[in-house]
Image (cartoon, rainbow, N blue to C red):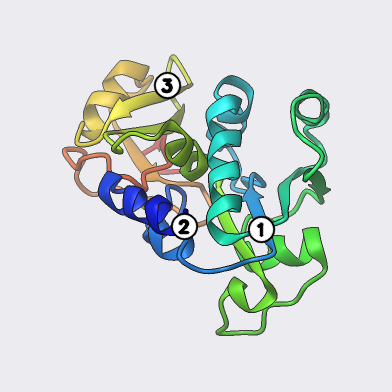
């Protein structure tokens, strides 16, 4: 079964949707005791993963189940900040017994996978090592959605926020320009700067004709002198 899952993920081009774009088929080629869902989303202003858990939970859980099957995990964990009480309560009524929700503290960088492993399992991954040494495989929510969706990755979910008339979470085709998304949201300013990603780790965009990629998470519109 693992061989078939890995081949499918490779063919559909699924990579980590929230970070460096590490090929997902490589992660799922290993063995692990625990499949951990990174739903901590610790960057300020970002909330697309919580939207996916609310609106696309069926696909996310199917993706998690696929991961557990591929790596042989007997336990699934969803790590989400404890402050999201309503979402946690809603999720608990829809998951099976071998999947557990573990609330984590509200701090940055709770979404770092090594930090999240410690917060949810108590296991320590030594510096320079990969999560596999502690029997854990980590995927973020959107990556699991893409796995569960079962189709080639041709679109991306992202937040558009800041000085815009319509702050919103959108699904857009990969390759659409940043400028088109900003125009859709309606910038409130004539002159503005844009940060791609969260305020902590994001980068100022130099060219708004740049296309959305599989790892684009957010566009934040700010005053030019912010």
How far apart are the alpha carbons under marks 1 and 2?
Answer: 12 Å
Residue at image position (48%, 36%) is: 148
Mark linked to residue 2: 2
**Farthest residue toward the front?**
1
Relative to 82, 152 lies left or right: left
Determine the secondary structure under disc 3. Answer: loop
Mark 2 is surrounded, within 10 Å at the Cα level, by few (under 14), some (14 to 19) or many (20 or more) other residues, namely some
Q: Quadrant of residue 125?
A: bottom right
Give whichever of 147, 181 is nearer the camera. Answer: 147
Residue holding disc 3: 164
Q: Earlier in the sequence, mark 1 or mark 3?
A: 1
Quadrant of the image containing the C terminus? top left
Mark linked to residue 73: 1
How far apart are the alpha carbons under marks 3 and 2?
Answer: 45 Å
Mark 3 and mark 2 residues within 8 Å of each other at the beta carbon: no
State whether residue 226 is above or below residue 51: below
* Residue 177 point in image, percent of width and height: 20, 33
Residue at image position (44%, 46%) is: 197
Relative to 89, 172 lies left or right: left
Q: Quadrant of residue 55?
A: top right
How far apart are the alpha carbons under marks 1 and 3?
Answer: 43 Å
Q: How many marks?
A: 3
* Residue 115 point in image, percent of width and height: 69, 65
* Residue 67 point in image, percent of width and height: 55, 51
Mark 1 and mark 2 residues within 8 Å of each other at the beta carbon: no
Q: Earlier in the sequence, mark 3 or mark 2?
A: 2
Q: Earlier in the sequence, mark 1 or mark 2?
A: 2
Mark 1 is surrounded, within 10 Å at the Cα level, by few (under 14), some (14 to 19) or many (20 or more) other residues, namely many
Mark linked to residue 21: none
């Amino acid at each position: 079964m693992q061989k078939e899952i890995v081949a499918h993920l490779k063919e559909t081009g699924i990579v980590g949707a929230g970070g460096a774009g590490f090929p997902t088929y490589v992660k799922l080629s290993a063995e692990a005791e625990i499949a951990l869902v990174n739903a901590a989303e610790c960057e300020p202003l970002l909330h697309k993963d919580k939207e996916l858990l609310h609106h696309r939970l069926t696909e996310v859980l199917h993706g998690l189940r696929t991961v557990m099957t591929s790596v042989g995990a007997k336990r699934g964990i969803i790590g989400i900040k404890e402050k999201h009480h309503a979402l946690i309560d809603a999720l608990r009524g829809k998951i099976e017994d071998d999947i557990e929700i573990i609330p984590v503290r509200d701090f940055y960088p709770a979404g770092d996978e090594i930090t999240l492993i410690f917060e949810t399992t108590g296991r320590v991954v030594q510096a320079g090592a990969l999560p596999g040494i502690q029997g854990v495989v980590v995927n973020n929510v959107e990556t699991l959605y893409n796995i569960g969706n079962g189709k080639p990755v041709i679109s991306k979910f992202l937040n558009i926020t800041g000085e815009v008339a319509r702050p919103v979470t959108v699904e857009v085709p990969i390759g659409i320009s940043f400028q088109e998304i900003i125009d859709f949201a309606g910038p409130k300013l004539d002159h503005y700067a844009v940060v791609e990603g969260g305020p902590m780790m994001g980068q100022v965009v130099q060219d708004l004709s740049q296309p959305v990629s599989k790892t684009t998470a957010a566009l934040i519109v700010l005053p030019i002198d912010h």
